[in-house]
Image (cartoon, grey):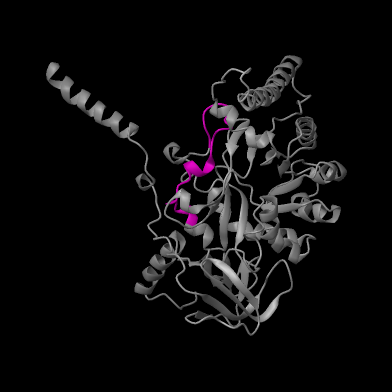
Amino acid sequence: MLAYKKPILTNLLVTMLCLCAPYTPHSFAASDQVPAPKQTRPIALSGGTIHTVSGENIAAGTVLFEKGRITAVGKDLILPDGTEIIDVSGKHVYPGLISTNTAIGLVEIAAVRATRDVSEVGEINPEVRAQAAFNPDSEIIPVTRANGVTLALSVPGGGLISGTSALMMLDGWTWEDMTLKAPVGLHLFWPEMAIDEALDTKSQKKRKEKRDNKIRKIRDTFSAARAYMKAKDAESSSAVPYHDSDTRLEALRPVLKKEIPVFVHADGIQEIQAALDWTAEQDLRVVLVGGYDAWRIPERLKQQHVAVVVAGTQRLPMRRWEDYDAPFTLPARLHELGIPFCIATQGGSFMTPHERNLPYHAANAAAYGLPRQEALKAVTLYPAQIMGVSDRVGSIEVSKDATLIVTDGDPLEIMTHVEMEFIQGRKIDLSSRHTELYEKYLEKYRRLGLTGKTP
C-alpha cells in the first residue's frame, strides 16, 4: 500500500497547486489586440455630418484634433501642416458612447469564479476600488467598443456597500492607462423594504429583522466613519491623541465631504424613499441607479438634486399589473418631469457581455416617447454630466477629448456600423472575437461554395 501513497499524494498536491495558482487573464480568455499608439500628428475628420450633441449638427463639417484633444470644429477649417486628413463624406461623426452601469473588466466568464472580481466577501466594503481589479485584456472590451461604446463605468457589486466605481476608457495597456476618472462614486445597494404579507407571522418577523439589520449596518458604518474623520482631522491638535488609520473608514471620507456621490441602487418606491430619507439625513450627494419608480416622486428628487441612471429599458415590468411598456417609457417620463437622467444597461455581473447593446436601450426609449436627440444625449452627454466629466467627454467641442466614433448612420439603429473609432485621438482596432468568428465561418461556407447563394 505504501507504494501507491506517493503518486496519490503527488497528484493531489499538483491538483491543489493548480487550483491555488494565481489567476491571470490568459488562463481562460484574453484579448490579444495591441492597444492603439498615442496620436503623433493632427488628424482631421472631414466631409461628414458632425453631431456635436451639445449644439447643432454640422453638415459637411470637420473635426480637428491633436495630442488627443479636439482643437477645432466647423467648416472650412485651416489645418496645420502635416495634418492627416480622413475623408468621411457621407458618414456621421458622434462622441463616443458612455455606459454607466457595467461590470466590464471585473467579470470575464460569469460561470468561472476565478474570472469574477466584481465583489468581495462581506457586506461592507467601501475600500474596494474597481479600477485596481480591472482586467485590461478582457475579451469583452473589444466586443463592446466595436459598437461605439468608448467609456464604461466599472461598478463593484455584492453586499450593501460594495466600493467605488471607476470610469474606464476601453483601450490601453494597464488599468492606470485606461482610467479616466476614479473614484466616481460609492455604490450602495439598498435592502428590500417590503415584507411579503402572504408569509406566516414568524417568517415575516425574520425578514423584517434581516432587513433592519442591514439598514443598521449601513447607518453604523457611516456613523463610525464620521467619528473617525472627526478624530483624524483633530489630530493636529496636541490635545487629541493619534488615531490609527482605518482603510475602510478612510474610503468614506470623500463621500462624507461630498466630493463624490453615493450611487444608490434601488428600484421600488419604498426602497427609493427610504434611501432618500437616509441620504438627506446624512447630507450626501446622491445618484439613483435603477430608479424604476423614480417618476412617482419627482418633487422629492428635484429637492435633493438626484439624477437617475436608468438601468436598462429592455426588461420586463416589475409588477404583474403594470403596462407591458412601463420600462420602455421610464426615460420619457423622467424627461417630461425634468429629472436629470441617463440610460445604461441592466448591468450586474451577469450582464457584462451585453454592454454592446447600450445604444439599443436608448433606441427603445426613443421608440416609446423620448425625443431622439434626448435618447442620444442619454448615452453621451448626460452620463458625462452625472459623473462629473462633461468637461472631457460626452460631446464634440473644442478642448474636449477626441473620443469619437464614425458611423454610416444613426448609432441607435441596429443596422448602423461603426467604421472608425478614436479614444483620446488614438485610432482603435475595431476587430473583436465577433469579427473573428464571422470571418471564420464565412471562410467555411466559402470553401463549401455556398457564399453569395440564397436558399
Q: Which of 69 and 371 is in front in this view?
A: 69
Residue 147, above or below 45 = above
Spot the residue most to the front: 238
Q: Which residue is drawn at 66% across and 50% down?
A: 387
Residue 393: which quarter of the image? Answer: bottom right
Q: Does 270 sit left or right of 7 as displayed?
A: right
Q: Which of 339 and 411 is in front in this view?
A: 339
Residue 429: which quarter of the image? Answer: bottom left
Spot the residue most to the left: 3
Residue 437: which quarter of the image? Answer: bottom left
Reply yes or no: does residue 127 show up in magenta: yes
Give, as a single range, the part of the protein colored magenta. Answer: 119-141
Location of residue 117 in the rendering, given as x and y in whole percent from the top left corner? 48, 39
Spot the residue most to the top: 202
Residue 328, above or below 455 = above
Reply yes or no: does residue 326 show up in magenta: no
Location of residue 355 in the rendering, given as x and y in whole percent from the top left corner? 57, 54
Location of residue 381 in the rendering, given as x and y in whole percent from the top left corner? 69, 60
Spot the residue most to the right: 299
Q: Nearer the viewer, residue 236 or 248?
A: 236
Q: The N terminus is located in which quarter? A: top left
Q: Residue at x 42, y 38 (%)?
A: 114
- In this figure, what is the number of numbered marks? 0
Residue 193 appears anywhere in the view? yes
Main SS class of the magenta portion in the image: loop
Residue 419 appears anywhere in the view? no
Location of residue 296 in the rendering, given as x and y in whole percent from the top left corner? 84, 43
